[in-house]
Amino acid sequence: MSSTRLSNAPILVLALALASCGARFQSAGTAARSEPGSAVHFARPPVIDGSRRACIEPPYTPPHDQTVLEDGTMVTMLGEGRAWQFKTPGDRDATPEEGNGLLMRLRAQGPGLTFLNYGLYCDDHLCFRWEGDLCDTNVLDRLRVFREAVAADGQLANVRLEISVALAGQLGPRCEANDPACVPPSYEGGTYDPSRGRRAGVLSSHSAGACTHDGECMVMGCGNHCLSWDHGGANAGATCEGYSIGEPIFCGCVEGSCAWFTQ
């Protein structure tokens, strides 16, 4: 897609970005400080043999060295296989207006396409993006569903379309138990002191998940949930209020559960 085409659609890009955020979060990260409320459910996608690394390999993803499918669709793997970009055959690229219009029509086809988005997801240009949970999502199946939905729409049959299929969720703990740098992250400032004890009970509604060490506990959502690494995933709900605790708090493993704690 040409740079001229992109420069003609700044308002469209902003609107798409806002629409994408609005689909996933209930309130803005700049919300006023407030008292703790109730936690929001975070999914727990499957875990295979203690991690999810198997879920960025075939059959969940295309072979990592594949660059083109049998129908001519171009394939690009990003990173270690957490995202895949596809460019379908066609006579020309879609304009931003065509892409946005197609997004709205595809979302209207049914709840399965609700979280399909369109924006600057493919390097520096517009494309579709569809996230799914690790171990629950087959990348090529997502591409097939997208292509079938476009075909059913019928308005851009001969237009090249790009879609990024991303796999959300943690592959495993953020660090190992014997790593001296594996310390509990703070909520908002403060330095963790390993010589002091831990007092759980703060933001307990935003804490969950079994653990054996601090590396299995991670800050998720908008930064106010302390959960075990196997929570989370695509389209996980999270409220984004900020909380005034009055003293430093940390996210770590307390008596076998991930929790916010004070010292």
Image (spheres, helix red, strand yellow):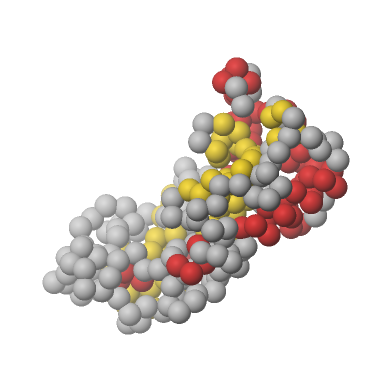
Quadrant where the C terminus sits is bottom left
Residue at image coords 60%, 17%: 4
Residue at image coords 85%, 47%: 152
| Residue 219 visible (yes or no) | yes
> 96 left or right of 249?
right
In the image, 212 versus 35, the foreground residue is: 212
Task: Place residue 252 in its image quadrant.
Answer: bottom left
Quadrant where the N terminus sits is top right
Residue at image coords 68%, 50%: 70
In the image, 4 versus 54, the foreground residue is: 54
> 154 left or right of 116?
right
> 157 left or right of 260?
right
> 189 left or right of 235?
left
Q: List the single residue furthest toward the front.
A: 70
| Residue 133 visible (yes or no) | no
In x, y percent, where is residue 80?
A: 43, 55
In x, y percent, where is residue 79?
A: 44, 50
In this rendering, is residue 252 above or below 128?
below
In the image, 113 versus 42, the foreground residue is: 113
In this rendering, is residue 198 above or below 4?
below
Number of disc labels: 0
